[in-house]
């Protein structure tokens, strides 16, 4: 059997068979540590059964993974941990883990230092706990093509304090990668700098789909690109989002993602939010609380299916909690889905204490205003009146409105100081059609022929539809006709021959919605 390799002592002593899978600072070979195996049958790999925590120390590299074939490891509630200082390279690959960790104990909790690295690749976690990686010094991590199954035992709390399925922490500024993963229960919390979640093509897409699914951003230098996120509500919980961001974040980039459902589909964001599909708010809003100096541009925000809650949706993009500096919303297409969608609030609301620097070159269509007095597409918070309109805008122009309501819809329920609506540049003079009457409603003449989102989660899980195809279908659905008034009528200060909305005729350099992976 080869010579014994004794792991470090910690909470529990590890006891398992390592059959050509791992060297714990002892070099290669087969090491018997006192555990058990189960024969998987003819042609199948044996199951390695843990009798204690798997503890990593020292500086030597550790490999846990398939040799000639995949490995299977029964955790029995034990986990993989670093004890003290670990500065070796850790590579876990091509394994199926069952029962690794518990609801209260991580499946993997590894903290690395110096210039070491962590790679976890092509592993499946069934009935297992959370995975927590801490990167210090100049260490890096790559998490690729792993699956967390829906039977995960990660603790989910209706109060909103659920344990993430993946929690990635530390102060290392080295590049890190989270790509091609499938997470069917729990969130992914990026709380260490310089993570790329996703990538440039469909092979890089992460699928976050199921109870409490979503990304949580909590560090600088984060990029979330080309992912599909669809949270399912936890019973008795009203606190879900496909993407949420901690207050400290100011430079995140989220682009080319499909984000669906949630109390707020996006809750908080600091940085640049572009080329995303934000679909089907089911309680409060598409985007709530963009932070100071955030830009939201070239996104499609649409109700493709009716809201699931008992009350009309409160608002589209909501500025709340005294967010008042440098927020710009431009070249987006916002579609409220008409009366069947039960989207009763405004497209944009600006609560007392908050301020919107610019709203320009956006399409606001198919909102059926049923909430509050003075129904308007851009207005104060839901409990505030609009007579007189409060001063909460610095610039508003080159927008197009095509909405309906229980009363005649207004376009603006807030004002730009020292400017007259529809008479002055910077306050609606150039809204479609330029120089037209106050509260003019103009058809955007978008395609709108096919279903807004004709794909099921079963299709997504089975790989029958990719993010590039979803975004391309949404682009086709909201593309302008050749005679559309959106073409050539956006704010020229952003781009010559700029268009209104998220999608143009394909000739502009900024016309990138639906081009992911193509």
Image (spheres, grey):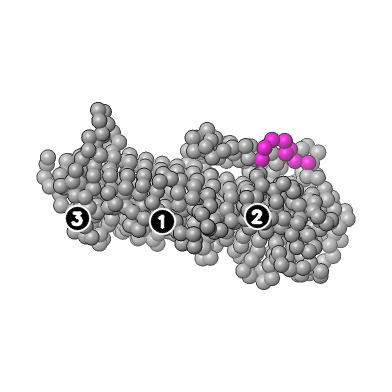
Q: Position of residue 341 (x, y in %)?
A: 69, 48
Q: Report the label total.
A: 3
Q: Nearer the viewer, residue 109 or 295?
A: 109
Q: Is residue 490 magenta?
A: no
Q: Residue 471's image quarter?
A: top right
Q: Which region of the structure is painted magenta?
A: 445-452
Q: Nearer the viewer, mark 3 or mark 2?
A: 2
Q: Position of residue 6 (x, y in %)?
A: 15, 52
Spatial separation of the CA atoms under disc 3 and disc 1: 25 Å
Q: Earlier in the sequence, mark 2 or mark 1?
A: 1
Residue linked to disc 2: 310
Q: Earlier in the sequence, mark 3 or mark 1?
A: 3
Q: Secondary structure at mark 2?
A: loop
Labels 2, 1: front one? 2
Q: Which mark is residue 13?
A: 3
Q: Is residue 45 left or right of residue 501?
A: left
């Amino acid at each position: 059997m080869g010579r014994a390799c004794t792991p470090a002592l910690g909470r529990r002593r590890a006891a398992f068979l390592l059959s050509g899978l791992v060297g714990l600072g002892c070099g290669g070979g087969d090491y018997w540590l006192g555990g058990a195996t189960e024969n998987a049958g003819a042609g199948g790999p044996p199951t390695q059964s843990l009798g204690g925590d798997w503890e990593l120390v020292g500086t030597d590299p550790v490999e846990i993974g398939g040799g000639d074939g995949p490995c299977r490891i029964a955790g029995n509630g034990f986990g993989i941990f670093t004890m003290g200082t670990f500065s070796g390279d850790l590579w876990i690959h091509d394994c199926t883990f069952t029962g690794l960790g518990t609801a209260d104990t991580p499946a993997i909790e590894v903290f690395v230092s110096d210039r070491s690295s962590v790679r976890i690749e092509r592993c499946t976690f069934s009935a297992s706990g959370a995975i927590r990686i801490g990167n210090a010094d100049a260490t890096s991590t790559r998490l690729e093509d792993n699956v967390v199954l829906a039977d995960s035992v990660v603790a989910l709390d209706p109060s909103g304090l659920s344990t993430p399925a993946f929690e990635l922490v530390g102060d290392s500024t080295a590049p890190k990668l989270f790509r091609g993963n499938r997470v069917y229960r729990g969130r992914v919390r990026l709380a260490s700098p310089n993570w790329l979640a996703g990538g440039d093509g469909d092979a890089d897409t992460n699928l976050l789909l199921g109870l409490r699914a979503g990304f949580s951003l909590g560090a600088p230098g984060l990029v979330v690109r080309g992912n599909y996120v669809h949270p399912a509500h936890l019973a008795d919980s009203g606190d879900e989002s496909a993407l949420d961001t901690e207050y400290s974040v100011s430079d995140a980039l989220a682009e080319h993602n499909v984000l669906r459902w949630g109390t707020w589909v996006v809750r908080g964001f600091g940085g640049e939010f572009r080329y995303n599909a934000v679909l089907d708010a089911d309680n409060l809003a598409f985007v709530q609380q963009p932070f100071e100096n955030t830009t939201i541009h070239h996104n499609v925000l649409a109700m493709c299916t009716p809201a699931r809650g008992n009350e009309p949706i409160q608002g589209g993009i909501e500025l709340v909690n005294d967010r008042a500096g440098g927020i710009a919303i431009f070249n987006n297409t916002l579609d409220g889905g008409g009366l069947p969608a039960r989207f009763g609030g405004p497209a944009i609301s600006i609560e007392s204490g908050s301020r919107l620097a610019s709203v320009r070159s956006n399409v606001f269509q198919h909102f059926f205003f049923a909430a509050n007095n003075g129904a308007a597409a851009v207005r104060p918070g839901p409990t505030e009146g609009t007579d007189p309109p409060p001063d909460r805008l610095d610039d508003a122009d080159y927008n197009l409105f095509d909405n309906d309501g229980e009363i005649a819809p207004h376009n603006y329920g807030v004002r730009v100081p020292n400017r007259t609506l529809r008479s002055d540049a910077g306050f609606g003079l150039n809204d479609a059609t330029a120089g037209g009457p106050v509260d003019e409603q103009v058809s955007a003449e978008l395609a709108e022929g096919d279903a807004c989102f004709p794909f099921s989660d079963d299709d997504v899980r089975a790989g029958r539809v990719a993010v590039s195809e979803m975004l391309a279908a949404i682009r086709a659905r909201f593309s302008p006709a050749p005679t559309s008034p959106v073409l050539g009528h956006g704010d020229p200060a952003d781009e010559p021959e700029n268009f209104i909305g998220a999608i143009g005729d394909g000739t502009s350099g900024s016309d990138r919605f639906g081009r992911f992976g193509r």
